[in-house]
Image: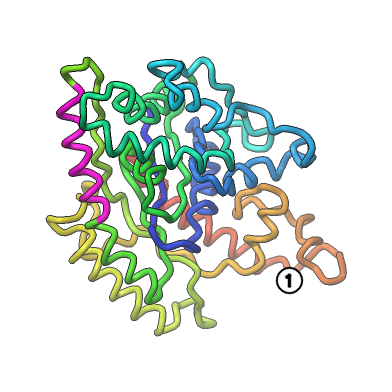
Amino acid sequence: MSKIVTMYNNKGGVSKTTTLFNLGVFLSQNGHRVLFADCDPQCNLTELFFASDPDADDPDKELPGTSIYQALLPRFRGETGAIAPSTVELVQSKLYPGTSLFRGDIEFSLAETYLGTSWNQAVTDNIHEKNTYVALYNLLHGLGQLGGFDYILCDVGPSTGAITRTVVLACDGLFLPLVPDRFCNQAVRLLGRVIREWTNRHELIAKTLGPFDIPSFPGNPILLGAIVQNFKVHSASKAKQSYVKWQEKISTDIHSYLLSKDGISAASGLDPKNPYIATIRDVGPLAPTAQMFGRAMFDVQQEHTKEASTTGQMYYGSVWNPWVDRMNDYKLEIGKIASVMP
């Protein structure tokens, strides 16, 4: 059975989408079949996925494949009890053929109302809302089984709204990407209680599904690990002390709040007092360059540096070598994340 995983933080700007994309490419290059599910109405993962395909860069041409909103709309409207995975057309990457996309849709923001209503009313005898409540989980697992995917990686926004709740509860586990600063620390102190409220609500709803012969789902994602990123380093490649202090404080609060009895559980093998599984330094011009070509950051080619050069000339020698070092460092950290996948 496919494992469903997300990167989630209720604080934005922590490289959720970028890290998720790079993780998926890394997994695919190491023998796994990966499905990206873009569940964020901003559709950044979809943009990144298609950036390597010049044929998909025409704003007047509809993107290939079925969008997540198109797929779920018949359920939202009550036209069908469940969505058949066979009705969903996924898109295989031309650059990374081990990855496919269940593409995003800006209109998926309208699902906030549908899913919010199901969240509130699925605990009642309203069978329509019960079927809506389980629809995304069932569809993702159905797509995983039909396509033989090892992993389904879901991109979500930083909100705590109905879409995010539905996606997070459908997952087996989540990674916590963050930057070492006050704002992420504030988010971490709240996040455990937020997710616990979701899982408690799910338990109430799940108890009402059986009499209607609607199978429930676990709805209890675990923390797979925290990923600290975008920090500056000294020339000796050590994080600057101001970042280290926030990193240490956030680590303490992950243990005290997120992984408390009122929070969520940690994956087996994760040290609650030292939850960082990867530390990704500021990647500099690698990120925007990789985005131009829809590539993983560890897969930028030397010819692509023309886009980073003020002269339009490709980087060589002592200018190119630091790029290679930084890509290798980044790939090493992505590998650490991949090593703890469920």
Q: Nearer the viewer, residue 222 or 296?
A: 222
* Rendered location of residue 61, percent (x, y): 77, 34
Q: How many marks?
A: 1
Could you tell whether 54 is left or right of 133 in the image? right
Q: Main secondary structure of the magenta part?
A: helix
Which residue occupies the extreme left position in the image?
A: 261
Could you tell whether 320 is left or right of 185 in the image? right
Q: Nearer the viewer, residue 321 or 52?
A: 52
Q: Given the image, on which type of amino acid does mark 1 rest?
A: Val
* Position above or below: 310 against 78: below
Residue 1 in view, yes or no: no
The colour scheme applied to this rendered structure is rainbow
* Rendered location of residue 10, percent (x, y): 38, 58
* Rendered location of residue 104, percent (x, y): 56, 38
Region rendered in magenta? 194-209
Residue that label 1 marks: 319
Residue at (53, 32) in percent of width and height: 69
Q: Which quarter of the rendered picture does the C terminus lie within? A: top left
Tell me if residue 199 is in the magenta stretch: yes
Residue at (32, 28) in percent of width and height: 129
Circle 1 residues within 10 Å: few <14, some 14–19, many ≥20? few
* Position above or below: 314 against 232: above
